[in-house]
């Protein structure tokens, strides 16, 4: 799953080396538009529905946080 997330992030922001950057939202790497696009891709690729209540900034601070959100929603 981490590899899929990394691919989505690289497509969204080809200018960022996500292997080096650990903080995403807190460092301003992903903005609101990126998060909306990311949620759309996650919904499409993982067949999960991320609701408005899940759009907390801490869920998108790091790749690990995004992975944890997806894992929690898949269960």
Image (cartoon, grey):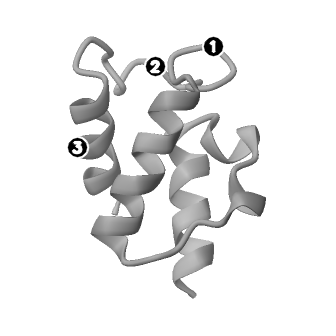
The Cα atoms of the two marked residues, 3 and 1, are separated by: 20 Å
| Location of residue 18 (image quadrant) | top left
Rendered view: 18 above or below 47: above
**Residue 53 shown left or right of residue 74 in the figure:** right
Numbered circle sitting on residue 27: 1
User: Which element type, helix, strand or loop, lies under badge 2?
Assistant: loop
Q: Mark 1 or mark 3, which is nearer the start of the sequence?
A: 3
Rendered view: 65 above or below 61: below
Tag nearer the camera, 2 or 3:
3
Residue at 58%, 29% in the rendered image: 32
Tag nearer the camera, 2 or 1:
1
Measured as percent of width and height from the top left, residue 35 is found at 52, 38
User: Which element type, helix, strand or loop, lies under badge 3?
Assistant: helix
Numbered circle sitting on residue 21: 2
Question: Quick one: label 2, few (<14), some, or many (20+) residues within 10 Å?
Answer: few
Residue at 73%, 38% in the rendered image: 57
Q: Nearer the viewer, residue 44 or 14?
A: 44
Numbered circle sitting on residue 7: 3
Residue at 39%, 18% in the rendered image: 20
Q: Mark 1 or mark 2, which is nearer the start of the sequence?
A: 2
* Contact, mark 2 vs mark 3 (Cβ under 8 Å): no
Q: Nearer the viewer, residue 62 or 53?
A: 53
User: Which element type, helix, strand or loop, lies under badge 1?
Assistant: loop
The Cα atoms of the two marked residues, 2 and 3, are separated by: 14 Å
Q: Mark 3 or mark 2, which is nearer the start of the sequence?
A: 3
Residue at 35%, 72% in the rendered image: 46
Which part of the image, by quadrant, shows the C terminus? Answer: bottom right
Rendered view: 38 above or below 52: above
């Amino acid at each position: 799953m981490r590899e899929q997330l990394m691919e989505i992030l690289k497509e969204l922001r080809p200018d960022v080396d996500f292997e080096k950057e650990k903080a995403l939202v807190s460092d301003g790497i992903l903005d609101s538009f990126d998060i909306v696009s990311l949620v759309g891709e996650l919904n499409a690729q993982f067949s999960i529905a991320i609701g408005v209540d899940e759009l907390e900034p801490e869920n998108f601070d790091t790749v690990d946080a995004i992975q944890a959100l997806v894992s929690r929603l898949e269960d």
